[in-house]
Amino acid sequence: MSGRIGMAGLLVFALTACGGGGTAGAAPGTRAPVTPTAPAVPTAQDTTGQDTPAATTSAAVPSRVPAANGDVSRVLARMSVEEKVGQLFMPVLYGTSADSVSGENQARYGAQTPAKVIAKYHLGGVILFPANVTSVSQVVALTNGLQAASPRVPLIIGTDQENGLVSRMGALMTKFPGASTVGATGDPARSRAVAKATGEELRALGVNLDFAPVADVNVNPKNPVIGRRAYGDDPAKVAAMVSGAVKGFGDAGVASSAKHFPGHGDTDVDSHTGLPVIKHTRAQWERIDAPPFRAAVAAGVDAVMSAHIVFPKLDPSGDPATLSRPILTGMLREKLGFKGVVSTDALNMEGVRKKYGDGEVAVRAVLAGADLLLMPNDLPKAYTAVTAAVKSGRISRARLDQSVTRLLTLRQKRGFLRAAPRASASEAAGVLRSAEHRRLAARVTREGS
């Protein structure tokens, strides 16, 4: 996603999850402050949004919860509905420490500090941006402090470190080349090595989820949002690079998220500011767009991010993929067999906000099959709406448990379900921009140029 985030008067590009380097869409810090409306424990009031068509019911949602082992089941069993709903959300918070007092936090979330926002909404995750970053020791203290603010369930702390154009932690990390350069090497082992090194540096900072790799096949030279962020325009070659990257992040013990499903490569509209329509037939999707995502699933990717794009041949409803059950559940889960976390792209992007209100968008994303709701435009409204939908039965409790189980299982897979990881500034200093990593960056840049 692309936008601008204001913090202490500083405007920075906030290319969340989706990333993107072009013109920015509406994002936190560029609009009038939102007056928070959600109490810490919302009531079952119907606040599902504006311009709402006939409600999608929970009757069509399978009741089967993903198989969970003892640890996941125990954590799930002790959560209230409000805590479970909070686990679905990953907003951006303002400040460089967990206790930073920010007017933006107060205006948007009704709590002054990141730690208080986490506690108020029982958040499952936080996404970091350049405005949260000043130094290695500061980021380590920030991530440790955020984890301390969530004592019952460790946080998923994410960022967009694709390398190249989208590098949220770029001020501190080795400057690895972007995907197009890595793809040009023609060697999936290079993709794996770069992802492993990137993951090692992120983990040293306390970040445990990278919204990478980009799995889009950039077949449209007029594409304003993907371009050089993709590994290339050949589906088979992109698939091999994506597979290598997923394995590399796994080697480093960091979760990865392939994006943007079902494929954002053939568009000339930026989903940050508009709603792209992909006109591929189903056969074209199978041949062009699907192979990298199929490879990511086979390689064990932890998460897949949806795209705010309309794909009429996969779903004729006119809804973007993020809100499409035929795409997220039918294509991604049932056809490709993906069992991990489905993340939305940032919900403050215009591509997903054109048709429904901010509360309704969150509810429909869950009903479509999403587990992680990234950067809602209005967190209080979205949180209240999802909670109300669960309490009314529109979202079944079994459906809510499916998502929370997947999010807990991701933590367990990456080793931070029982206890939050704690980063060390001294250890991070030895990992970030190490001589080995700088040599790798130079070698891949040379080979891919």
Image (cartoon, grey):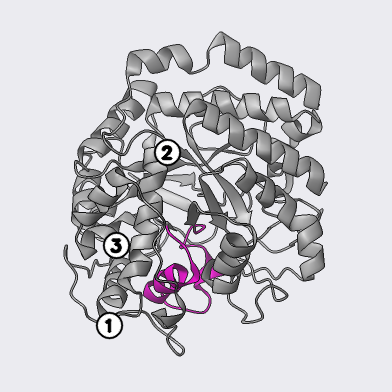
Identified by mark 2, the residue type is Lys
Q: Using the numbered discs, state the Cα–Cα distance from disc 3 to disc 1 in whole angstroms.
A: 15 Å
Magenta part of the protein: which range? 344-371
Q: Does the rendering let one see residue 428?
A: yes
Give the residue number, with chain letter if any, for mark 1.
46
Q: Closer to the observer: label 1 or label 2?
A: 2
Horizontal and vertical percent for residue 446? Answer: 77, 20
Q: Closer to the observer: label 2 or label 3?
A: 2
Does the magenta segment cover residue 355?
yes
Give the residue number, with chain letter if any, for mark 2.
413
Give the residue number, with chain letter if any, for mark 3.
85
Judge the density around disc 3: few (<14), some (14-19), many (≥20) Cα neighbours within 10 Å: many
Judge the density around disc 1: few (<14), some (14-19), many (≥20) Cα neighbours within 10 Å: some
Using the image, determine if residue 117 lies above or below residue 208.
below
Horizontal and vertical percent for residue 45? Answer: 22, 81
Callout 1: SS? loop
